[in-house]
Image: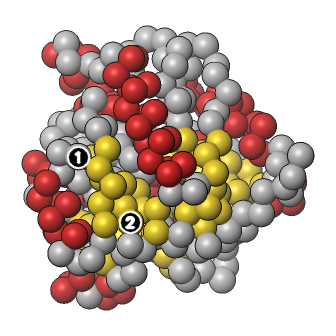
Amino acid sequence: MSKIHLHIANETNQLKAVVLGIGTDQGKPYDINPVAKMHKEEGTYPTEDDVIAEIATVETALKAEGVTVFRPKNMPNQKQIFTRDIGFVIDDKFVVANMKEPVRKAEIEGIQHVLDQLDPDSIIEVPGGATIEGGDVLVHHNHVFVGISKRTNKAGFEFLKATFPDKQVIGLDVVVSDDPKKNILHLDCAFQPVGDKYAIIYEDGFQEKPQSIYDLFGEENLIKVNQQQMNRMFPNVFSVSPKKVLVEEGFTTLIGALESRNIQCIKVKYAETSKLSGLLRCSTLPLVRA
């Protein structure tokens, strides 16, 4: 079995290898986040068949771009859709997330066959007491943005600062609410770099103005979205390269904004999966970018 040589320096470089979630054998409906709970109560929760079909379109799109796609091994009655949360790569290190929700901790077992292809010295375990989920961690060259939320705590942020002393690790407090229209589940629901100099941002998703983002990107390079667009998860696209981004096909306003900046949009249907409070970035765990 050949080894996987991890390399993630940012969110947008040419994607080479990724772990894409699966939607089979999900078990009981989620109610561990406000959006999924709302859809469960309103009878609009997505069917397993719809989720499987939507993820399949993403796999097809990624393979068409020459990306090596790994999939979790199926674990009955276990949701394995949002692989981003269970682990993440910074440079050449794989950090095994410490999930806040006990029901999700077993998901890492589904990608053990991927971890077995890594150098054991490249795998970092998060200590007890520190919670970190990959949706709260965004790598941007020498900077690592960490959303401090219900899912990732201050101890998790401090652990990343200590573990990556050569990086500027920046903590951003996001809005946490029981109201599904206001809650920011993870940082990547309110902010994400795209292209070679841009970022999508929902400004009201932070407890205070994230000045570091404005300083680093420049206000003129921020693609701002409103609350309704955030609720549809506009920031949660997934970059295949600086010039190509996977986008939910219904995000017409965002597609126009990206295309006006010479970023090609690969449109996929993902509206049903988004009802679980996750979209394209949430479903993908990049291992290697150029």
Viewer-proximal residue among 18 and 277 = 18
Q: Which amino acid does label 1 sit on?
A: Glu
Q: Nearer the viewer, residue 142 or 273?
A: 273
Sequence order check: which comes first, mark 1 or mark 2? 2
User: Is the residue marked by circle 1 packed among few (<14), some (14-19), or many (20+) residues within 10 Å?
Assistant: some
Residue at image mark 2: 244
The color scheme shown is secondary structure
Q: Residue at x 22, y 70 (%)?
A: 259
Residue 34 image offset from top left, x and y in percent: 27, 31
User: What is the crowding at mark 2: few (fewer than 14 residues within 10 Å), some, or many (at least 20)?
Assistant: many
Q: Residue at x 58, y 55 (%)?
A: 67
* Distance between the alpha carbons at the discs numbered 1 and 2: 14 Å
Q: Can residue 192 be seen in this view?
A: no
User: Residue 249 bears which disc, if any?
Assistant: 1
Identify which residue is drawn at 89% across, 46% down.
1
Q: SS for tag 2?
A: strand
Q: Residue type at mark 2?
A: Lys
| Side (left or right) of 182 relative to 138 | left
Q: Nearer the viewer, residue 5 or 29?
A: 5
